[in-house]
């Protein structure tokens, strides 16, 4: 054999040997890394079943793609395991795949931390870890990935701050990290990312300001940081981002002015700055953003007028400036934006008329101008818009009629024109296109009946027509509307019987028909309304028995049948309404015993049964009503027997009203448990024995216990009264006579004496100083010359004249809407406050209605912020109320003193507590009292006294309105002694100031009711300050 042949054989042998040796090594190293990664994953659907350890390379495995360096060394270039329902965690072995350029593990259930070893994948360009459950911090080692262009880590549970090293990702163009728990400030190193086009990190916990260096991200097109806690001003450097298309910063705490430099980003198509704390004017320069399609600035504190330059946004489709403090008129230039489909300007302070030019916006689908001060008519052109689906103008001062063709040409879904001064009839075409879902025309002056176009509107879900002058009967066709869930026809002039077809409204959840003239019996078919939660038929002329079928409505939460003519026994089935929270049966002719089963109503918070003819004992089972908080009122009935001691278990109860019955025995000592009690009334019964010595009872007015022959102690004084003690004239009481329907108590705020909310029932004297009789029994035609109920020291009207120098101006300490308050030092040295009410019936010796109402309703309130009412005096046309003068300082003196230390929380809780007492008690002369309460709110907010210098308006209300007119509704109006660094507090105070302005409206008809005031105060607290308003946290 030749040498050459031998050499060839050796070479072949060596090659075969090498190949055999190589094959015997098995799976390569990257395959081993991948198997380790798999071993830490949960793969219940076996998607990775072909990952075979016997393979020499992983290149054929699911999700694995390789590239070849040479014939013997293929390497893993990409790993895509997206959306395979994988669980477990990502192994640190991922760092061994050093040739990886794409890693996609998105849309799985991977948890634990992102391994820092991923930083070893130095060739990585795309990293998708989004939509998993990754936790802990973003590893700083990611900053070594210099080729990375895409980093998607959104929708995880990552926490901690962005690492500074993220600024080293010089190739990065997309950083999506939204919907995590990332905290801390944004690193200034972000400014190094010159190629970054999209940065989205919304819905995290980011704090601090938006760094000005963001302006260096010259390629940035999308910046989204919504739903964080960013503070400070929006840097003007944002205007350097010439390529910016979307700026999404809503729901942060950004403040200051909107920078005019923003108008330099002329490529912007979406600008969303809503739900922040921006102040000042809307920059007119925003009109230069000619490519803008969506402009959202709502829910800020912007003021001034809407710049007419906004009309230059010719491509705009949606503009929302709502929930600000914008004033002035709606600019007609908005009508130039022909593509505008949504325009929201609601909840501002806009005035003037609705521009007719807006009716030329043919693409308009949603228009909301509600909660402003707009006047004039609704432009007729709106009825011809063919795309209009939502049209809301409620809570303005609009007048005239509703366009009668409204709805004829447009597919209306929502129409709300409530709380205006609209007149005429309801248009009949509103549901012509069968799309109408929500119709609210309440609180207007509409007349006529409900047109058939409404009663046949099968799409209708809510029909709200409360507070008009609508007439006719309740249309039976309404009951054919299978989608109808809410009907409110209250405060109208509807009459006739309620049709039995009402039982066909099977979807009905809320039915309110109060304050009408409905007659006859309540149809038993009402029991078919299995979803009914709220039913109010109060203040009508319904008669007969309450049908037991009504108690088939097991979802009932609020049931008000009060002020009708219902008779006979109360059905025991009432106790089966386990969801019931409010029950009002007052002022009917119900009789029989109170069903013990009512003790099963464990969710009940208010129970009003006064003014009926119930007899027998109070069921001990009522003591099980552990949720009862607002009131338990059983007054003006024929109840007898002892007061059950079990009532002492109702520990949340605030008002217990049992007066004018035939109750006997003692007041139970268990009432010591009623720690929340604010008011009670046991008067006009047959109670005996000493009043339990309990703090809550000791602080009640004497009027809460009068006319009980054997009752003594407590506020009544000793149990052995002397002849000189106060005569209560027991024989003047007539148990068979209704002394009036129960009224729950009012706190009348007196400007100048500040929060003068008053306690004590008063009685008239038949002769000056000698004999006292209850006011309710005084004939309305009785003529009197002088009427006193004075403090025990005794004094005359002449003493008051001398003490005030004939009510000279120098003795004035305050003024309210209904009178003037003077300080009087009596001959005995006793100091009192005298409120002189303005009489509106001059020349008439009778006590006028205002005076009568005030002294009638001041009897049962007890509150730590209440000043005592000593008595009253009527003399030759002058109505006087005599109050305790606070020698150690009233709220007014404390508030207006130099050393005032009342913080906002204290002031707000005082105001809320007073309002709640007012709202949950009796009727008053609301035209005066709501106004007076508003004055008190203004005192608490501004720190100023009700009486102001003449050159500043003469009174606090005028001063406030002048300030707002000249300088807008800004924090400068608030008391400078309060902490004005907390923006949340300032926002809350401004909201309460708006409530005060409503309370002090010049027209009494524009003022809210006290329950509405309470609701607004509670809502303001819920949305902004979150003060604890429970009784145990009240402020002294």
Image (spheres, rainbow, N blue to C red):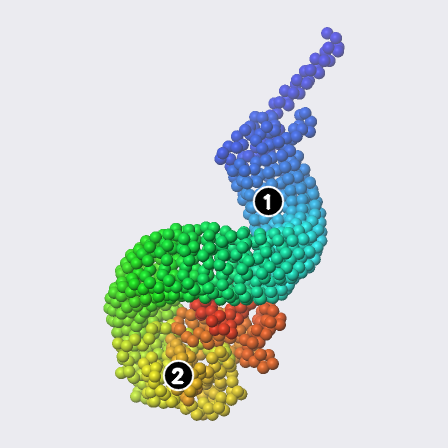
Q: Tell me if residue 604 comes above or below residue 706 in the rendering.
A: above
| Furthest residue in direction top, as rendered | 1
Residue at 62%, 40% in the rendered image = 127
Residue 153's tag is 1
Q: Report the side of 179 relative to 423 (left or right).
A: right
Locate residue 600: give its quadrant: bottom left
Q: Is residue 950 left or right of residue 543?
A: right
Q: Residue at x 63, y 59 (%)?
A: 333
Question: Going from the N terminus, do you reach mark 2 or mark 1 first?
Answer: 1
Q: Residue at point 62% right, 31% down?
A: 65
Residue 482 is situated, as x and y percent measured from the top left of the image, at 39, 51
Q: Position of residue 761 (x, y in %)?
A: 37, 79
Percent of width and height locating residue 390: 51, 55
**Who is closer to the viewer here, 970 or 548?**
548
Q: Is residue 36 visible?
A: yes
Badge nearest the viewer, 2 or 1: 2
Residue at image coords 59%, 28%: 60
Q: Relative to 829, is 1002 above or below?
A: above
* Numbered disc 2: secondary structure: loop
């Amino acid at each position: 054999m030749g040498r050459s042949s031998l050499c060839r054989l050796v070479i072949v042998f060596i090659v075969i040997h090498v190949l055999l040796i190589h094959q015997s090594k098995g799976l390569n190293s990257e395959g081993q890394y991948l198997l380790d990664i798999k071993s830490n994953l949960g793969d219940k659907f076996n998607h990775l079943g072909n990952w075979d350890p016997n393979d020499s390379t992983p290149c054929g495995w699911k999700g694995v793609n390789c590239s070849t360096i040479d014939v013997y060394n293929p390497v893993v270039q990409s790993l895509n395991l997206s959306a395979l329902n994988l669980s477990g965690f990502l192994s640190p072995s991922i760092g061994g795949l050093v040739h990886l350029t794409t890693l996609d593990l998105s849309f799985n259930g991977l948890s634990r931390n992102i391994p820092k070893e991923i930083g070893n994948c130095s060739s990585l360009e795309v990293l998708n870890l989004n939509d998993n459950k990754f936790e802990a911090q973003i590893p700083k080692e990611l900053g070594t990935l210099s080729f990375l262009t895409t980093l998607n880590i959104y929708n995880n549970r990552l926490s901690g701050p962005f690492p500074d090293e993220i600024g080293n990702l010089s190739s990065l163009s997309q950083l999506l990290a939204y919907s995590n728990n990332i905290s801390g400030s944004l690193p200034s190193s972000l400014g190094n990312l010159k190629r970054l086009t999209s940065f989205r990190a919304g819905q995290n916990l980011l704090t601090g300001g938006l760094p000005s260096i963001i302006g260096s991200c010259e390629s940035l097109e999308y910046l989204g940081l919504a739903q964080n806690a960013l503070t400070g001003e929006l840097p003007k450097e944002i205007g350097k981002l010439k390529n910016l298309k979307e700026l999404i910063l809503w729901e942060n705490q950004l403040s200051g002015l909107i920078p005019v430099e923003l108008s330099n980003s002329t490529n912007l198509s979406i600008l969303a700055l809503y739900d922040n704390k921006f102040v000042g004017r809307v920059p007119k320069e925003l009109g230069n953003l000619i490519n803008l399609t969506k402009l959202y600035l709502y829910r800020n504190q912007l003021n001034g007028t809407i710049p007419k330059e906004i009309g230059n946004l010719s491509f705009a489709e949606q503009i929302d400036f709502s929930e600000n403090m914008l004033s002035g008129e709606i600019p007609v230039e908005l009508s130039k934006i022909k593509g505008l489909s949504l325009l929201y300007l609601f909840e501002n302070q806009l005035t003037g008329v609705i521009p007719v030019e807006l009716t030329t916006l043919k693409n308009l689908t949603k228009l909301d101008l509600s909660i402003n001060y707009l006047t004039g008519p609704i432009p007729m052109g709106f009825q011809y818009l063919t795309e209009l689906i939502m049209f809301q103008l409620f809570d303005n001062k609009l007048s005239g009629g509703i366009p009668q063709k409204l709805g004829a040409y447009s597919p209306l879904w929502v129409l709300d024109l409530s709380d205006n001064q609209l007149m005429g009839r309801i248009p009949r075409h509103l549901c012509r296109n069968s799309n109408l879902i929500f119709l609210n025309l309440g609180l207007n002056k509409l007349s006529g009946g409900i047109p058939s176009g409404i009663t046949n509107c099968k799409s209708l879900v809510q029909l709200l027509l409360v507070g008009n002058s609508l007439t006719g009967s309740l249309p039976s066709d309404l009951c054919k509307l299978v989608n109808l869930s809410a009907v409110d026809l209250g405060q109208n002039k509807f009459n006739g019987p309620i049709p039995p077809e009402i039982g066909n409204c099977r979807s009905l959840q809320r039915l309110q028909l109060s304050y009408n003239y409905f007659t006859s019996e309540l149809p038993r078919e009402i029991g078919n309304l299995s979803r009914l939660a709220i039913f109010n038929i109060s203040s009508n002329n319904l008669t007969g028995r309450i049908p037991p079928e009504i108690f088939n409505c097991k979802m009932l939460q609020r049931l008000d049948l009060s002020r009708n003519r219902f008779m006979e026994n109360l059905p025991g089935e009432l106790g089966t309404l386990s969801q019931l929270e409010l029950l009002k049966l007052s002022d009917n002719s119900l009789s029989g015993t109170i069903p013990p089963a009512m003790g099963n109503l464990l969710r009940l918070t208010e129970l009003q049964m006064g003014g009926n003819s119930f007899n027998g004992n109070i069921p001990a089972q009522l003591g099980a009503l552990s949720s009862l908080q607002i009131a338990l009122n059983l007054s003006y009935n024929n109840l007898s027997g002892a007061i059950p001691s079990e009532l002492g278990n109702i520990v949340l109860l605030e008002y217990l009203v049992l007066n004018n019955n035939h109750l006997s025995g003692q007041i139970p000592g268990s009432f010591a448990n009623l720690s929340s009690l604010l008011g009670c009334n046991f008067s006009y019964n047959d109670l005996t024995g000493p009043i339990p010595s309990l703090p809550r009872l000791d602080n009640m007015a004497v009027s809460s216990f009068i006319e009980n022959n054997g009752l003594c102690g407590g506020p009544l004084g000793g149990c052995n009264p002397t002849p000189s003690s106060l005569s209560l004239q027991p024989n003047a009481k007539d148990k068979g006579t209704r002394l009036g329907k129960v009224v729950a108590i009012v706190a009348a705020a007196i400007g100048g004496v500040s929060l003068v909310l008053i306690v004590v029932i008063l009685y008239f004297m038949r002769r000056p100083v000698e004999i006292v009789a209850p006011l309710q029994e005084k004939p309305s035609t009785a003529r009197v010359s002088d009427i006193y109920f004075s403090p025990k020291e005794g004094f005359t009207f002449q003493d008051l004249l001398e003490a005030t120098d004939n009510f000279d101006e120098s003795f004035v300490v305050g003024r309210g809407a209904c009178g003037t308050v003077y300080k009087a030092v009596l001959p005995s040295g006793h100091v009192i406050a005298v409120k002189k009410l303005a009489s509106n019936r001059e020349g008439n010796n009778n006590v006028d209605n205002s005076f009568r109402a005030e002294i009638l309703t001041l009897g049962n309130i007890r509150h730590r912020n209440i000043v005592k009412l000593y008595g009253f005096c009527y003399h030759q046309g002058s109505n006087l109320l005599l109050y305790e003068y606070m020698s150690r300082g009233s709220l007014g003196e404390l508030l207006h003193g130099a050393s005032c230390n009342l913080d906002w929380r204290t002031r707000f809780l005082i105001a809320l507590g007073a309002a709640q007492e007012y709202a949950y008690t009796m009727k008053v002369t609301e035209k005066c009292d709501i106004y007076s309460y508003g004055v008190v709110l203004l005192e608490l907010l501004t720190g100023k006294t009700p009486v102001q210098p003449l050159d500043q308006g003469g009174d606090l209300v005028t001063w406030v309105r002048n300030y707002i007119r000249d300088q807008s509704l800004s924090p400068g109006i608030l008391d400078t002694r309060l902490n004005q660094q907390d923006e949340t507090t300032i926002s809350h105070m401004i909201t309460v100031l708006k409530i005060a302005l409503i309370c002090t409206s010049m027209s009494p008809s524009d003022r809210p009711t006290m329950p509405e005031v309470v609701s607004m105060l509670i809502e303001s607290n819920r949305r902004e300050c979150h003060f604890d308003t429970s009784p145990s946290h009240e402020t002294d």
